[in-house]
Amino acid sequence: MGNKKDINLLPEEFRNLSPRSADRRREGRAIKEVNDNIKGLMDMITSRASSIQQEKRKKPSPDLSTSFTKGTFTVSQKKKDGTVGFFRAFKRTDLRKLEKALDVCKKDLIVSSKSNYVYCTDLGKVIVVDKGVNGLPKTVTIKNSDNITTKTIKFSNNTPYLYPKFNEKGLPKNIVYMNRDEIWYLDNDKAILLIFKNGEPEHLKINLSGSVSTKNPKALMNYLETYKILHQDKKLNVLLLEEKKIELDDILKIRPHYVLYRENSKMYTVLLLDKSMDICNQFTMQELPNVTTEAWDVLFSNEIYEYVKSNGYSYDNFRQADDHIEYWQDIGNSKVCVLRCKI
């Protein structure tokens, strides 16, 4: 049977068709009930897996998925072009990434059909990946020895993300950003940031009508992030919007240790913050340093500021060299790098 799965590796509730299960019942061992909504699906998996095991005994095959040619789990085989319609939209490399996120591997796959992928691990964990109407993975049901969970699957730049199952009805179709805890949806004049906390989604609705940031994709993303941060941090919200009267569109970047915003058309201001989000230093610049925005996190720190201030340097003389920022100073007839920091 090679390295393919033995049906007896499945949890007990999936072995109720096995002769040995009758012996266990006679010995008085109770079989744990599976949730009614999932039980039918798991019974089908067990039945199909049993059929595979019988087929394997008759004629071993290196590819279990080809055994599913009838019933619920059907595989469309197109030998001529070497692919099915699903793989035109979803590459095998993406599938491998999804398997890694689910902590399974190719050898755990026992079903590959138009509508499902089914995995069974050596430890008895059963994973059912259901595809949507477009053939892309949509949800995954994970059955461990003691619980069943269902998650929503999303892909961003070929990277899979698993979220607690949620209702997408009423959400905009256009997704502009994803990470492990958030999904950002965008419509014409509104955005909805779906933020997951303790398995529950929070809908942060943002009205974009009248915002100048909507004209520039990069500025728009910064606007949404700034809005989210100020929504979550009430103290910072009061400091920037109420006390300093800063327009949201003028805030260029917020990080835990600084805020950079546009004072006017000729001036920028940097607020350096302590751990309590209080202002500990403040300075202005006529133009931004010639470094990437990623380098700002290093450049606008209290340590760099104190060094620049104590030596009478100017932020205008900072330059970037690959993954470092450097400060060059004229000494005699030569330019000398007097400060170098890794980003």
Image: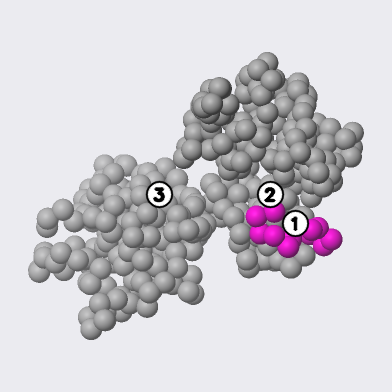
| Relative horizontal placement of residue 297, taking residue 7 as reference (left or right) | right
The residue under label 3 is: 101
Image quarter of residue 16: bottom left
* Color encoding of the figure: one colour
Q: Nearer the viewer, mark 3 or mark 2?
A: 2
**Which element type, helix, strand or loop, lies under badge 3?**
helix
Locate residue 335, reporting x and y percent: 53, 28
Q: Nearer the viewer, residue 1 or 162?
A: 162
Q: Is residue 173 above or below residue 199?
A: below
Q: CA distance from mark 3 to mark 2?
A: 29 Å
Q: Nearer the viewer, residue 326 or 255?
A: 326
Locate residue 211, reporting x and y percent: 81, 58
Q: Amino acid at mark 3?
A: Ala
The residue under label 1 is: 213
Q: Are marks 2 and 1 in contact (CB under 8 Å)?
A: yes
Mark found first going from the N terminus, 2 or 1: 1
Q: Nearer the viewer, residue 16 or 40?
A: 40
| Relative horizontal placement of residue 68, taking residue 281 as reference (left or right) | left
Q: CA distance from mark 1 to mark 3?
A: 35 Å
| Relative horizontal placement of residue 228, taking residue 25 as reference (left or right) | right
Image quarter of residue 165: bottom right
**Which element type, helix, strand or loop, lies under badge 2?**
helix
Q: Residue furthest bottom?
A: 80
Locate residue 263, reporting x and y percent: 83, 41
| Relative horizontal placement of residue 248, taking residue 293 as reference (left or right) | right
How would you rate the neighbour count of disc 1 (Cα within 10 Å): few for under 14, some for 14-19, many for 20 or more? some
Instruction: Residue 77: say if magenta.
Output: no
Identify the residue shown where x is 77% and y is 28%: 283
**Which element type, helix, strand or loop, lies under badge 1?**
helix
Magenta segment range? 207-219
- Residue 152 visible in rendering: yes
The residue under label 2 is: 222
